[in-house]
């Protein structure tokens, strides 16, 4: 872990890390999905996880909040290992916002109610305070005029922005994004990435699984390259995209038409 914990010149490197993965291993039967991954996420930084489909990126993200339980190693959050009990883990999940590929909004509730629900039911906010917070967040993601709309009347990009607002409503310490644009039409990808970029500019700690290489190159502070459940390379975007040291990284980026 020392080489991971002592890397210089990273955003937040002068503060304790928010998340640390220490030799994390995850198996599905005999299949090894994550094979001894050690990475840390610093406060205020955007970390992008890239690599081929099936390489373990999304699995690691889901291990961050114990949606998947690990088989070896440790996941540390705020200096403590993730708790074993589901009740204690629910408290940790309140501090981590999660945005999935497929929005997972309640279809029978308006955009405003989707965003307000968590603060009311989990945080115990009054309905008026929660709706006030929800409205402010819908404005933040550019959907103040869609507060009364139901998900079926929103585009995919708009639904994903509601999902981001819903996650932010819990005032999380870290945001986890699992390929948030993969289910979107090309014309709506940009509006979601722009919201994410604004969050990054505001200093939100973010872990992003993405196939959007331009976003990773321009917005990430740290990029981690996965292949077959292992980290093959990690570093600042300039290193990964302009001067990769691992042949597997060069091959992966080359297949995407990205040449150093």
Image: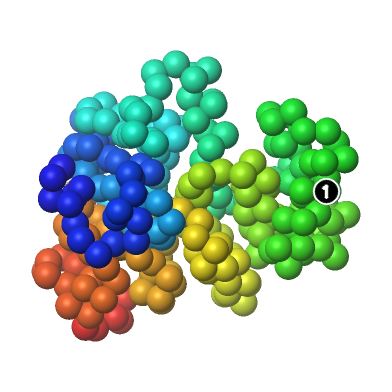
Residue nearer the viewer, 140 or 60? 140
Q: How many marks?
A: 1
Crowding around mark 1 (Cα neighbors within 10 Å: few <14, some 14 to 19, many 20+) is: few
The quadrant in which the N terminus is found is top left
- Location of residue 217 (image quadrant): bottom left
Q: Is residue 224 left or right of residue 151?
A: left
x then y, percent, for residue 242 = 22, 80
- Location of residue 258 (image quadrant): bottom left
x then y, percent, for residue 121 = 74, 29
User: Would you place residue 150 above or below residue 67 in this image?
Assistant: below
Label 1 sits on residue: 132
Residue nearer the viewer, 205 or 160? 205
**Can the viewer see residue 40?**
yes
User: Would you place residue 151 above or below residue 22 in this image?
Assistant: below
Secondary structure found at label 1? helix
x then y, percent, for residue 260 = 21, 83
| Residue sitting at the far front | 14
- Location of residue 129 (image quadrant): top right
User: Would you place residue 24 above or below residue 103 in this image?
Assistant: above
Q: Is residue 165 left or right of residue 204?
A: right
Q: Residue at x 22, y 28 (%)?
A: 72
Q: Residue at x 20, y 61 (%)?
A: 8
């Amino acid at each position: 872990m020392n080489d991971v914990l002592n890397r210089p010149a990273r955003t937040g490197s002068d503060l304790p890390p928010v998340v640390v993965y220490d030799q994390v291993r995850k198996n599905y039967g005999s299949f090894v999905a994550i094979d001894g991954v050690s990475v840390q996420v610093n406060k205020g930084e955007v970390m992008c996880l890239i690599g081929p489909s099936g390489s373990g990126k999304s699995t690691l993200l889901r291990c961050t909040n114990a949606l998947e339980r690990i088989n070896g190693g440790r996941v540390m959050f705020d200096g403590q290992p993730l708790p074993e009990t589901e009740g204690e883990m629910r408290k940790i999940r309140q501090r981590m916002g999660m945005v999935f590929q497929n929005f997972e909004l309640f279809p029978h509730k308006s955009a405003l109610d989707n965003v307000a629900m968590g603060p009311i039911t989990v945080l115990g906010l009054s309905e008026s305070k929660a709706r006030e917070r929800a409205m402010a967040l819908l404005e933040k993601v550019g959907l103040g005029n869609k507060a009364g709309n139901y998900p079926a009347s929103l585009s995919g990009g708009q639904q994903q922005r509601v999902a981001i607002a819903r996650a932010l409503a819990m005032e999380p310490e870290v945001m986890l994004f699992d390929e948030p644009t993969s289910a979107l039409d090309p014309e709506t990808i940009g509006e979601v990435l722009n919201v994410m970029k604004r969050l990054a500019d505001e200093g939100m700690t973010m872990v992003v699984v993405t196939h959007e290489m331009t976003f990773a190159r321009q917005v990430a502070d740290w990029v981690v390259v996965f292949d077959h459940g292992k980290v093959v390379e990690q570093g600042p975007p300039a290193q990964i995209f302009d001067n990769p040291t691992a042949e597997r990284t060069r091959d992966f980026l080359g297949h995407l038409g990205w040449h150093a």
